[in-house]
Image (cartoon, grey):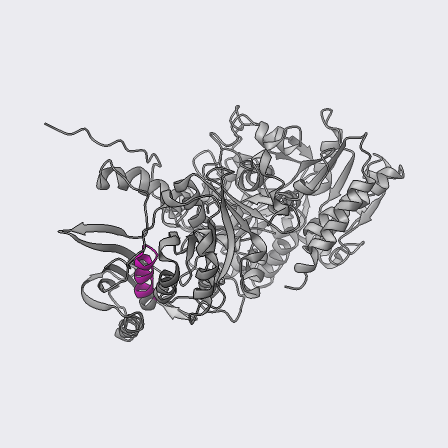
């Protein structure tokens, strides 16, 4: 007997850049096309990694692709990003990355020197993050077909004991934690492309957040409800996904969100919202109120976590919405990123 | 951060809102139009409406260059770039504006060479780097951006760059304000005057609004303190039964404007006899075209321009919203068929469009929740 075909809700006639930008269009593509066809009818809220039970052993698995231009930028490079990004996707799903496999898609004509530098960067990042690179694959495509190189990774690892994450467990009164200043990565990349002729002493924040997640877990594991690394689409998009998945409101205190002056300045100039800018070394966590202080102290006591802050709380209303309070009595709705962030005219 | 934080300081904002409450006559309803889309954006972005007493109504004006452009002009611009030898360049704001057959971004996804530039000078550089291609810059904006287009054309002429042209859609602000004041369904008590435009044209061109129409106008900056202070100044004028032009944005706007910029505009552009505005129809002498002495770089002279005229979808009420007759959420399509992601009208595209600003920052705020700001 043939099973009924799942219903596809993705109606966009063609793929646009926005479908890869991490915002609303990306979510529509995943939920409307991939999920119904690939994951079957019982879809759990989509997270950064899948947790599987294999013959009684619980494992988390994730996959990621890296298509950054330029390949190298202040503070990191595509190779480092590939390792850290994968480790982070597992970490914020509550798992400790143990092994990665890597696929390189290389352009004919790519200087070996550049490839070697990226492979070295990956090896060093893997060592720092405490993961093994266990295998991989290589493909070569014609010159000009892959922005010099793309890297795809898959990562696997066991759950961090005691953590059980789900948007459904989020309750009004829970606190929202942020591990440090936002927007460094996205603005660094924007400036490194050189189109703007703006210069700033700014570095990508790419790093493994696993040590921070583990520090958090040690003191607050039972109180951690949800975590996410706010990469493409930024903090605003991650929190909107949370708000939608749990049906509650997220109230941010905008003044509490740490943003470096360089990032703020660039965003003011370009008409971008720092909350929509990508990060590669930060994470958001929702913790039960009774664990919030201990969680914050634990993060701040961990190297790289000194700038961690509480940025808001979960509220009953407005349902499924992120609201920013600006400290002088005004509020605004903070929406997901729509399309790519486009600089404004004037 | 300097020049930003002091204009968002809670204590100063608190004083300004107190002053507004003191000056506003509770028996009276005030309708203030913020002409510029940048102000509309700031008002929603900073939640300023939450700070105003309910009898002060802010009406969004026509000062969003992307929004006032009729759809046909977008199709005209894109039609020139159907030639595979042409690189279409524009500001980021233009990229999602729908034409009859899709936005520039959708054309890009289908293979058209469409690129975002940050200034017309970058488009000129692109032409110099790609001598085998023709680079066309889709120029939009009020007097704010016209000088940079003018200077770019002057440079193209001086350096003899032949593979470059401008599709000029520059418009001027004064005729639009006049059209609004002439509109029978419009009742405005005073204007929050455009800030960026005034850095170029200065404050004098607004004199008639005060002198002949009897409406106060205060040229305003874009930070919360700026907008609130401008409202204080408007209320003070109305309270004294005065109508004059005042400049709140003195740190940026010189009373006389920027002579060098005005000279560049005069060198390169002349007034069109008339130009179509979205929702407002044809307005005479309301837009700029490139002078014949720069005709070689005028895309409209170099290419065949179909002169497409497309009426907006009947159900969309962009015109009424643009003139301030309707609030964004009163449009039948708002938030349903028309969202920032799938905009039907341009007001939903640009960050300065009142529909996009309202959609992004305001419309999901539950009424019960608007006072929570005090808590955080």
- Highlighted magenta segment, given as a residue range: A81-94
- For the stretch drawn in magenta, the main secondary structure is helix
Q: Is residue A83 magenta?
A: yes
Residue found at x 85% / y 35%: B214
Q: Residue at the left extreme?
A: A1
Displayed quadrant of residue A303: bottom left
Side of B201 relative to B307 (left or right): right
Q: Position of residue B177 (x, y in %)?
A: 73, 37
Side of A84 relative to B267 (left or right): left
- Residue B148 lies, with reference to residue A205, above or below; the image says above
Q: Is residue B188 magenta?
A: no
Instruction: Report the quarter where the N terminus of chain B lies.
Output: bottom right
The answer to whether residue A147 of the structure is visible from this angle is: no
Q: Position of residue A291 (x, y in %)?
A: 44, 56
The answer to whether residue B343 of the structure is visible from this angle is: yes
Displayed quadrant of residue A110: bottom left
Q: Position of residue B297 (x, y in %)?
A: 56, 52
Relative to the observer, which residue lies in front, B71 or B52? B52
């Amino acid at each position: 007997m043939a099973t009924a075909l799942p219903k596809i809700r993705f109606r966009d006639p063609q793929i646009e850049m926005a479908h890869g930008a991490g915002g609303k269009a990306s979510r529509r593509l995943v939920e409307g096309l991939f999920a119904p066809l690939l994951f079957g009818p019982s879809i759990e809220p989509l997270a950064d990694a899948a947790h599987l039970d294999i013959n009684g052993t619980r494992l988390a698995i994730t996959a990621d692709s890296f298509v950054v231009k330029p390949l190298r930028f202040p503070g990191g490079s595509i190779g480092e990003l590939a390792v850290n990004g994968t480790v982070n996707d597992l970490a914020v799903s509550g798992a400790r990355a143990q092994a990665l496999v890597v696929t390189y898609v290389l352009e004919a004509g790519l200087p070996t020197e550049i490839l070697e530098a990226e492979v070295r960067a990956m090896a060093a990042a893997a060592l720092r993050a405490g993961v093994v690179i266990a295998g991989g694959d290589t493909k070569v495509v014609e010159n000009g077909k892959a922005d010099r190189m793309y890297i795809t990774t898959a990562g696997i690892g066991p759950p961090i004991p005691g953590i059980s994450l789900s948007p459904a467990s989020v309750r009004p009164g829970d606190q929202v934690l942020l591990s440090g200043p936002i927007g460094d990565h996205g603005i660094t990349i924007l400036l490194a492309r050189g189109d703007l002729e703006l210069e700033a002493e700014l570095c990508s924040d790419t790093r493994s957040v696993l040590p921070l997640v583990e520090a958090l877990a040690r003191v607050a594991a039972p109180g951690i409800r949800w975590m996410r690394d706010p990469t493409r689409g930024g903090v605003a998009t991650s929190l909107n996904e949370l708000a939608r998945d749990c049906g509650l409101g997220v109230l941010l205190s905008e003044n509490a969100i740490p943003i470096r002056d360089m990032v703020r300045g660039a965003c003011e100039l370009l008409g971008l919202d720092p909350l929509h800018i990508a990060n590669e070394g930060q994470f958001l966590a929702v913790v039960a109120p009774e664990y919030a202080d201990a969680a914050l102290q634990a993060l701040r006591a961990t190297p790289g976590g000194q700038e961690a802050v509480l940025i808001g709380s979960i509220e009953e209303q407005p349902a499924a919405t992120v609201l920013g309070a600006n400290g002088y009595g005004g509020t605004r709705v903070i929406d997901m990123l729509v399309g790519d962030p486009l600089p404004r005219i004037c | 951060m300097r020049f930003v934080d002091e204009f968002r300081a809670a204590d100063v904002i608190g004083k300004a809102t107190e002053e507004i409450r003191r000056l506003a006559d509770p028996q009276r309803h005030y309708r203030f139009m913020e002409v510029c889309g940048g102000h509309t954006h700031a008002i929603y972005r900073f939640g300023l409406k939450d700070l105003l007493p309910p009898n002060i109504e802010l009406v969004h004006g026509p000062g969003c260059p992307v929004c006032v452009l009729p759809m046909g002009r977008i199709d005209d611009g894109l039609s020139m770039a159907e030639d595979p030898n042409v690189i279409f360049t524009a500001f980021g704001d233009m990229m999602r504006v729908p034409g009859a057959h899709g936005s520039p971004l959708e054309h890009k996804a289908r293979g058209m060479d469409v690129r975002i530039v940050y200034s017309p000078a970058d488009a000129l550089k692109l032409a110099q780097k790609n001598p085998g291609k023709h680079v066309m810059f889709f120029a939009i904006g009020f007097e704010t951006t016209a000088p940079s287009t003018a200077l770019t054309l002057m440079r193209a002429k001086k350096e003899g760059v032949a593979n470059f042209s401008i599709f000029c859609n520059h418009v001027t602000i004064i005729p639009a304000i006049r059209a609004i004041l002439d509109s029978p369904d419009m009742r405005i008590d005073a204007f929050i005057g455009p800030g960026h435009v005034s850095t170029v044209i200065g404050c004098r061109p607004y004199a008639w609004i005060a002198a002949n129409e009897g409406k106060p106008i205060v040229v305003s900056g874009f930070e919360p303190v700026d907008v609130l202070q401008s409202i204080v100044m408007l209320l003070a004028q109305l309270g004294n039964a005065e109508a004059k032009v005042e400049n709140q944005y003195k740190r940026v706007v010189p009373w006389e404007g920027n002579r060098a910029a005005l000279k560049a505009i005069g060198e390169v552009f002349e007034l069109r006899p008339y130009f179509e505005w979205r929702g407002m129809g044809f307005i005479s002498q309301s837009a700029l075209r490139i002078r014949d002495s720069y005709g070689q770089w005028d895309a409209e002279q170099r290419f065949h321009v179909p002169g497409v005229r497309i009426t907006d979808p009947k159900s969309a009420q962009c015109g009424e919203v643009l003139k301030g007759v309707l609030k964004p959420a009163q449009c039948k399509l708002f938030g349903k068929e028309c969202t920032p992601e799938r905009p039907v009208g341009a007001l939903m595209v640009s960050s300065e469009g009142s529909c996009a600003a309202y959609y992004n920052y305001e419309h999901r705020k539950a009424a019960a929740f608007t006072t929570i700001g005090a808590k955080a």
